[in-house]
Amino acid sequence: MIPVTASRTSVRRVKSFPSTSNDNFRLFFTKASLPAVLTKLPEHTFIDANHAFLKLFGYTKEELRGRTFVDVCISREAEEWGPVLAALARRRSVVNLEQTLYARSGQPVTVLTNVNVITMAEGEYALTTLQNITERKRTEEALRAGAARLKHAYQAAHAGAWEWNTATNETVWSEGLWKLYGLSPRSCKPSYDSWRRAVHPEDRDRIEQTVREAVRSRGEIEVEWRVWDQEESERWLLSRGRPLTEDGPIYIGVVFDISEQKMVERELLQYRRHLEALVEQRTRELEERNAALLKEVSERKKTEEALRRSESRYRDLFENSMDAILVAGPNGTILAANGAACDMFGMTEAEFRARGRKPLIHPEERRLMGFLRERAVLGKVRRELTCLRKDGTPFIAEISSVLLDDSGGSFVNLRDISERKRHEEKITALNAGLDQRVRERTAELEEAIREQEAFSYSVSHDLRAPLRHINSYSSMIEEDYGEQLCAEARTYLHRIQGASSRMGSMIDQLLELSRMSRATMVFDSVDLSELVRQALRMFRETEPQREVEAVVQEQVMAWGDRSLLRQLIENLIGNAWKYTAKKEQARIEFGTCEKEGEQVIFVQDNGAGFDMAYRHKLFRAFERLHGSAEFDGAGIGLATSHRIVKRHGGRIWAEGKVGEGATFYFTIPGKRDVEDLPKGEQAD
């Protein structure tokens, strides 16, 4: 549909424009900066054209006069000019109709066409003016392509971008940033407060202080913090930002996911501690090798830290990436390379463009074809390939690539993992030599476990005797001398008796917790629903005055040790029973649900609940989120439950809200998963 004015074109009579009688109008027509042409109606033949029109389309007045737009191929298709002809037939104007016309050279020209009908002494004419928007259209297309490349750059670098107005606290987040924060755009609006809530509670004060100091001094921001993802696990993020202008309130920056780097650092630290425990019994040669390895790791960390400090913080996202990034065209051409890529291969960006992909891959690397096929099918790929530096030095790179579009262009992200591979080979060789010592250490640990069991037996008997004496003598004092004692003294006696009873209970629970870790497991099919009903009957008999609504899903089956699963159910139901004691309409529900594609079992109540900021303390021994004066207990039940679920190869976690209740989720692997375990793990 074309833009056509609703009213007829106003008529203005002049003596004769074609005969140049109207000098003012001719002067305006000739000197106009926009291309303009006058055609005779109804034949639509050219009468005159101004200089701008002739220059744009490459014709002379003599070549145009007496011919139509279609005759001289200004419009390749008659249909292209059809809407204009239809409007002129109704004597209506055409306003800003976007068309693609063609110059004499065949070059396409995108224009906005405006046509008005004018009446003169010789008859009716059409005055057509054109606005050349070809460059504007090319610019718009280039901007769209640049935005697409930037989006793919974020995806390839596993990063997100942000903009923050420090004066109004208004923020803008990229699509990748929502994913890094573990949030949905529908869950909240992007703001400083939304970002603050996404930060791990233990990191908030630290990074807020860092951000405030940076904003106050108009300096750059660089902070690391943790967030909780949807699987209730920690992820580490690194954010870098700087002011958009020297004195403006706008900050811009990027966020990287550094969880994998943090995990590697933790694993290296744990393994180093393990080696330190074993290296005491090794020979001097192994000690020297281990010291050399630690020194090498330390020097590598210092080198990486020096490189990070020297990295320019004023580069854009492409140059700011810590990984090598290449923008590749079809057929193995290289269009762009960041500084990290130039350093990795020892080449300049111009050399990348001139040489292409082929010299970068080792000639004997047979995995390249599979790499390209997988990317062509899936649109992305991540593999390890052997590459070559400019000086011919081979190295192993972890390469991830994402196709940009159907033309075959792609983003390529490279990481040099040669050093990691060498460390893995050293560690493998070191482990091979430690097998015998590990077996010896295992024998020592087994002996220590037997001694621990003997000690536990001794504790369970030797500590009970003094506690019984304390209870007995305090009871005798109360019976024989109770009337002679003052009220405060009797209170002290009662406290002594209560404390000794609690200590005895704690000893029993500690021994039970220890027994849970050592007991031999006998796997069978267990009806958890029936165990829940038995536990509820037991608690109702203990407190018959309580009114508790219980909802139990039928036939919830599990494959595990019946006695341990009974203890697990009694602990979780007992926990729900205890913390709903102050509810007039208490409710406990047991059943199954699906969490992220996995079938899980849950126990839910509407009791006291808990603060999710302290959920990491729930399953620790003697860690309690409620005081003993409010709810009794020793803090062993959930620790025991956690150990039972772990022994079955499952997971347990909780969700809750203060005053609204709590839900405990756990998983128990099926029979096939248990049978796939080594026999020792099934029984131990």
Image (tube, rainbow, N blue to C red):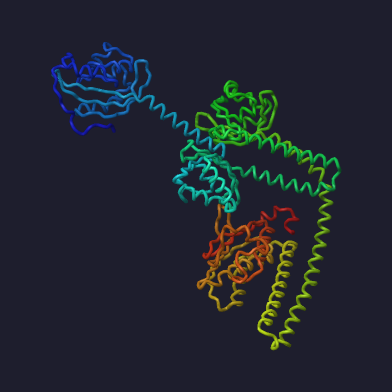
- Residue 607 position, x and y percent, is 54, 67
- Residue 603 position, x and y percent, is 57, 64
Query: Is 198 on the left-hand or right-hand side of 259?
Result: left
How many numbered badges does the structure rendering display? 0
Query: Is 489 on the left-hand or right-hand side of 595?
Result: right
In the orientation shown, which residue stands out farthest toward the front? 217
Q: Is residue 285 above or below residue 662?
A: above
- Give whichever of 133, 98 is nearer the camera: 133
Question: Residue 629: which quarter of the image?
Answer: bottom right
Taking the image as drawn, is residue 530 in sight?
no
Q: Is residue 294 above or below residue 664?
A: above
In the orientation shown, which residue stands out farthest toward the top? 62
Q: Is residue 110 above or below residue 171?
A: above
- Residue 58 position, x and y percent, is 33, 14
Location of the C terminus by quadrant is bottom right
Q: Is residue 376 above or below residue 134?
A: below
Q: Residue at x 27, y 23 (%)?
A: 129
Query: Is 155 on the left-hand or right-hand side of 40?
Result: right
- Give whichever of 77, 302 is nearer the camera: 302
Taking the image as drawn, is residue 189 in sight?
yes
Q: Residue at x 83, y 59 (%)?
A: 447
Query: Is 326 on the left-hand or right-hand side of 244?
Result: right
- Give whichever of 337, 625 is nearer the camera: 625
Question: Residue 68: which quarter of the image?
Answer: top left
- Residue 372 position, x and y percent, is 59, 31
Location of the N terminus by quadrant is top left
Q: Residue at x 67, y 43 (%)?
A: 264
